[in-house]
Amino acid sequence: MSDFFDPYNADRPLMMKCSCGRDHTLADHHAEANADEAAATLRARSETADFEAYSNEFIEATLVKALFPQDAVRRRFLRAVGKGTAMAAIASVLPVTSLQAMAQDKNALEKTNLKIGFIPITCATPLIMAHPLGFYSKQGLNVEVTKTAGWALVRDKMINKEYDASHFLSPMPLAISLGLGSNATPMNVATIQNINGQAITLSLKHKDNRDPKNWKGFKFGIPFEFSMHNFLLRYYLAEHGINPDTDVQLRVIPPAEMVANLRAGNIDGFLGPDPFNQRAVFDEVGFIHVLTKDLWNGHPCCAFGTSTEFIQKNPNTFAALYRAVLTAAAMARKPENRELIAKVISPAQYLNQPEAVLTQVLTGKFADGLGKIQNVPDRADFDPMPWQSMAVWMLTQMKRWGHIKGDVNYQQIAEKVFLITDARKHMKDLGMPFTAGPGYTKHKIMGKEFDPAKAAAYADSFAIKKA
């Protein structure tokens, strides 16, 4: 018999559904079975002593890297004070106390039943996969991960406390905290969910029009106003002499609707999240013009965050949540896990996408829509470091495009919203030099260096900006 019906089984009623009792297609049945098998394999890998050691070291290394973005400074610090003193000093300024031992006492958790929102895109991979792999439950948490239709709804549900935490576009907590587009509500970025993982995708009718200087009059989709997609697309267009406010149209379109709008001819292209760039290729309606990795290698996209109030009221719960998501990020960073992760997150309750599309995105071996197979292993990656310098860059673009008026204290805002440890006092007490300080590093965007210590001058330096 097929997987659909089982009319000769005396032990179960005959229902005009799949033989498993669910009302879904054969493809859905097989996808869920594959996902369950892949999740079981990944769970087994996560329970090995090797992965536990790797995960713990990954979490600690992530935090130490936040303290010492310049490795030479870290080495001088360790040589000056010794490992024991350094570990004690670092432990006193970690954003979450005793990360390696957190959530061992499940009774210490202030809240165990949590609701977390996500948009069905590959950026949310760590947050999503932590659910079927049991990383939340291992921390004593009963988490419901809830698919959400769009970013404005995510914002509203967080402000209204319908969600305890959420998948965010990384500029969103800055905007919400500043009251841009909503009532001001203090939010925090705990981790970056993903780096890279986006692209500019164009309609196939433009495959012979690859020069952005010729794109006047184009219509582009972006997922939200306060998004890296918007800021990177505007930056890219402006660097080619196109004013994004006057020479083209930018339309806010939910990610899941971008391919349909491209197919219908409503837009000429989009800068959007995966898997929809690859889905446009899969559906033969678009091609990948450029990966955002090629504009800014290592740029942040989405983040995992919550309200400042939630962290203050539930510090132990937040610590457990933080560890679960970081553990998932540690697993997602390993290339050998990517194909299995694609199987885990492809079913309808998560991304609802063909496994082949997700595999291309996560492994970086993909068809570009122009007849070539590309091999870019870090097309998408999962470095959780929420550099405050990234937040400063986002704020300079909010200033550039008129979202923020007047003088801006860039570092003060970044440090309130992006949670990175602050070791400057300890470094000063020990006579250790530092430059821009913990949480800050320089970034290179389209070949130009961004120095967060000179943010105001940077924001004013652009020839094309909001008048």
Image (tube, grey):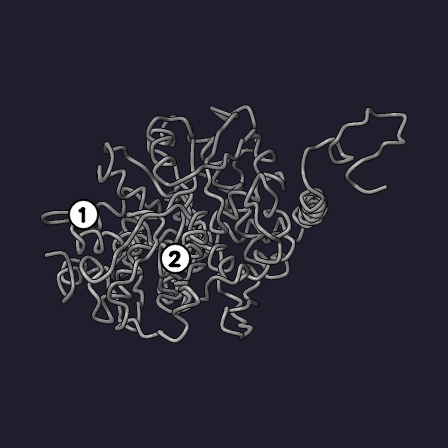
State the residue at coordinates (22%, 37%).
179
Residue 61 x %, y %: 48, 55
Given residues 10 and 421, the one toward you in this image is: 10
Tag shown at residue 265: 2
Residue 410 x %, y %: 20, 51
Tag shown at residue 115: none
The quarter in which the N terminus is drawn is top right
Kindly tell me whether residue 430 is visible in this rendering.
no
Kindly tell me whether residue 460 is visible in this rendering.
yes
Q: CA distance from mark 1 to mark 2?
A: 30 Å
For residue 113, above or below residue 136 = above
State the residue at coordinates (29%, 64%).
442
Looking at the image, residue 197 sits to the left or right of residue 137; the answer is: left
State the residue at coordinates (47%, 55%).
276
Residue 399 x %, y %: 17, 52
State the SS at label 1.
loop
Given residues 373 and 46, the one toward you in this image is: 373
* Crowdedness near tag 2: few (<14), some (14–19) or many (≥20) residues, C-alpha within 10 Å: some
| Mark 1 residue type | His
Q: Earlier in the sequence, mark 1 or mark 2?
A: 2
State the SS at label 2.
loop
Looking at the image, residue 93 sits to the left or right of residue 57; the answer is: left
| Mark 2 residue type | Gly
Tag shown at residue 403: 1
- Name the quadrant containing residue 17: top right
State the residue at coordinates (27%, 46%).
415
Given residues 93 and 199, the one toward you in this image is: 199
